[in-house]
């Protein structure tokens, strides 16, 4: 599967880095475009085999999946540039533009036949197979939690794209109504998890470790906790019970955290992050 990524900002670059390490995509089948050449230099520094260009049209030529990774206010302009050159019968358009849903994408990419400039790109569909994607920045390390919602795609396209993103961490094909919730839990959630790590690291320094050692300990502990859930598919409370003895240290710490609003603050933070219409 060949990927064209339009936009080399944080998330576009992260996707390119992840795909370059994927078992399912060849590095030479990845192209990323951006109007600022300096942003493309870090892509080449990561892996010279990734194709880079400042020409969006050149990038999408021959691609199976065209990924839009840009700011919302740049989407319509980019779409108008790409529409005449896209093959709506063959190419998938996948948007990582936050807040732009599938109905918006259908309206943006709706095309009359007469707007097709390239004779070889003629198609009969009014819009291509569309995907709304929400990964997180851990996709650069193939550890993303990615959400996909589609419109006009075949079951085979769903399965193929889902397989690629599962290879970049884990992925779920969900109803579009759950995309904002996925955004909060997994994309905003990266920041929330890192804020917990920062707080725990500060506590580790207070306990006597150097900042570097404290961060190393906390990061590995978080990794271990996550692996217990992903490997054994157990419930968090079941794992908590294993290290919480009666009148022990752990239960004292948990109770102190709850008295200070630990669970409540997390849930309120999640609810506050839901995009407002």
Image (cartoon, rainbow, N blue to C red):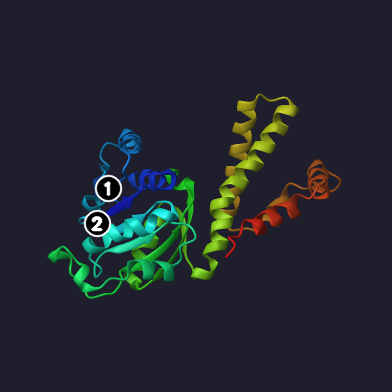
Residue drawn at x 31%, y 64% is 92
Q: Quadrant of the N terminus?
A: bottom left
Q: How many marks?
A: 2
Residue 96 seen in the current view: yes
- Residue 5 placement (x, y as % from top left): 32, 51
Q: Is residue 118 left or right of residue 261?
A: left
Q: Is residue 250 left or right of residue 61?
A: right
- Residue 85 placement (x, y as % from top left): 21, 61
- Camera-side residue of 277 and 272: 277
Q: Is residue 216 above or below residue 14?
A: above
Query: Which numbered tag is attached to residue 120?
Result: none
- Residue 93 placement (x, y as % from top left): 33, 62
Residue 238 seen in the current view: no
- Residue 212 placement (x, y as % from top left): 60, 26
Tell whether label 1 touches label 2 (CB within 8 Å).
yes
Distance in Å between CA atoms under marks 2 and 1: 8 Å
Label 1 element class = strand
Q: Dot 2, how many residues are within 10 Å of its Cα: few (below 14), some (14-19), or many (20+)? A: many
- Which of the two discs, 2 and 1, labels the residue nearer the N terminus? 1
Give the residue number, with chain letter if any, for mark 1: 31
Residue placed farthest to the left in the image? Answer: 119
Residue 21, located in which quarter of the rendered image? top left
Residue drawn at x 33%, y 73% is 154
Q: Is residue 28 left or right of residue 240?
A: left
Label 2 element class = loop
Give the residue number, with chain letter if any, for mark 2: 63
- Camera-side residue of 90 and 256: 90
């Amino acid at each position: 599967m060949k990927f064209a990524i339009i936009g080399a900002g944080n998330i576009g670059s992260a996707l390119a880095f992840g795909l370059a390490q994927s078992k399912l995509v060849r590095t030479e089948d990845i192209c990323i475009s951006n109007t600022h050449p300096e942003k493309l230099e870090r892509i080449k520094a990561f892996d010279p085999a990734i194709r880079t260009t400042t020409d969006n049209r050149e990038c999408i030529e021959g691609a199976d999946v065209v990924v839009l990774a840009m700011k919302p206010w740049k989407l319509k302009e980019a779409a108008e540039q790409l529409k005449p050159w896209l093959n709506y019968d063959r190419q998938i358009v996948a948007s990582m533009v936050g807040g732009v849903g599938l109905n918006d994408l259908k309206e943006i990419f709706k095309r009359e036949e007469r707007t097709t400039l390239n004779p070889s790109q003629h198609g009969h569909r009014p819009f291509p197979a569309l995907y709304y994607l929400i990964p997180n920045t851990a996709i650069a390390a193939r550890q993303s939690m990615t959400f996909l919602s589609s419109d006009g795609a075949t079951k085979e396209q769903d399965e193929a794209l889902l397989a690629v993103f599962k290879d970049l961490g884990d992925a779920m094909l969900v109803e579009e109504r759950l995309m904002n919730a996925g955004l909060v839990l997994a994309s905003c959630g990266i920041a929330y998890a890192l804020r917990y790590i920062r707080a725990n690291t500060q506590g580790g320094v207070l306990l006597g470790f150097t900042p570097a050692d404290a961060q190393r300990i906390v990061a590995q502990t978080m990794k271990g906790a996550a692996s217990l859930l992903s490997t054994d598919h157990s419930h968090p409370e079941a794992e908590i019970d294993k290290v919480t003895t009666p009148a022990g240290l752990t239960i004292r710490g948990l109770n102190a955290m709850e008295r200070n609003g630990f669970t409540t603050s997390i849930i309120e933070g999640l609810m506050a992050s839901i995009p407002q219409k």
